[in-house]
Amino acid sequence: MLEFDYWWLIVIPFIFGMGWLAARLDLKQLLHESRELPRAYFKGLNFLVNEQPDQAIDVFIEVMRLDPETIELHFALGKLFRKRGETDRAIRMHLNLYQRNDLEPAQREHALYELGLDYMKAGLLDRAEQSFAELGGSRYSKDALLALLEIYQREHDWNKAIATAQQLQQSHGINQATLLAHFYCEQAQEAMQQQRWDAAQALLDQALKVCPSHVRTQILLGELKQQQGQLPQAAEIWSVLAQQQPDFLPLIARRYFAAMQAQGRTAEAETRLRTSLEKRPSHDILLTLFDAVQQTQGAPAALELLKQELRRAPTLQAFNRLLGAQLEQTPADERAYVESIKHLIHRHARQMERYTCHACGFKAREFYWQCPGCANWDSYAPQRQEETE
């Protein structure tokens, strides 16, 4: 028993000594790595500061190879490059991440999603589409579908846009009714340009099915009936629209009046236009009404209409039209003076005749359902700039 105790007196110090030695070795290695890693980081940051991003990327990629825990830093750097517009460098960072064999599935999905965003920013839409399409069923599936929806809208691939919007609605509960209606309207307009009337009607019916109160669909239905020579139906569609959505009457004022006039409902159309004009100034309604009064009641009555509107709601457009109407009655020796004034007013009036996007401020002479600047839908008010100020 005594020999056993002596044995432990020898073994125990030996075990403690080995543990102490191992701890010293681990500590030495840890200190070595902690010295090496910061130097590499500072070297990479120094390259970034000195506008040498390619050299910085090489350094950071090497750091990631040595220490996989730095992956989040590389995601951040990739986003930084993309935000700065350096998409080629962002692609390189995220592609290197995606191609790593030791990456966890969640991190690989993240890298693929970021890579898709890089491709989108670079305008490589086919590669972006491929990247996002591979994310189906992942935790990025919703964001990937939203990105795909944006891509298909850019490419005007309305069939794929419709399928993607339906998938977003069914899988993620995101209401896409208005967007779907617009996509069907885009297809319907193409069909109308090709005089495929039955196809256009079917597409507009589908648009109303997904979004029954969609204004654009109702306007296109009226146009479709008008182009087919079905003026009574067109007049009825636009009459209902003018009653239910009076703010959009300026967009169809002339077509509405022409269809109503063809049906012998001129007085009814004039009354509706006057009522709408009294509630809100509108250049389009005023000019439509001016021409209508000039036809039915003569030039003096039309001129008086302009004067009344100028007193009630003065606008440059109305004043420009008044000068044009009075120019013919101006004596020859004063005509040049009046013409110079009209030219000046017309130039400024043209600047105020634009529609303005509420989302990005983009101004356009034509009304767009989708803003050419920011690609938002329904961001234009149906009133022109001067009428909304």
Image: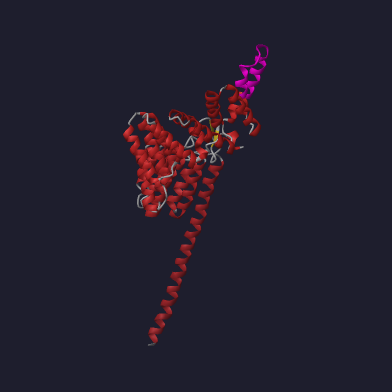
- Residue 357 visible in this rendered orientation of the protein: yes
Q: Position of residue 129 (x, y in %)?
A: 37, 41
Which part of the image, by quadrant, shows the N terminus?
A: bottom left
Residue 180 to residue 261: above or below: below
User: Is residue 123 in view from this perspective?
Assistant: no
Q: Residue furthest top?
A: 333
Residue 365 at x, y percent in the picture:
53, 30
Task: Report the side of 248 relative to 388 (left or right).
Answer: left
Q: Residue furthest bottom?
A: 1
* Callout count: 0
Q: Is residue 36 left or right of residue 332?
A: left
Which quadrant would residue 383 be assigned to in this image?
top right
250 or 19: nearer the eye?
Answer: 250
Residue 90 percent coordinates (x, y): 46, 42
Query: Looking at the figure, which quarter contains the C terminus?
Result: top right
Is residue 248 inside the magenta stretch? no
When asked about the image quadrant of residue 94, the answer is top left
| Scheme of image coloration | secondary structure
Q: Nearer the viewer, residue 25 or 78?
A: 78
Q: Which residues are magenta?
A: 321-345
Q: Magenta-highlighted stretch: main secondary structure? A: helix
Q: Position of residue 204 (x, y in %)?
A: 37, 39
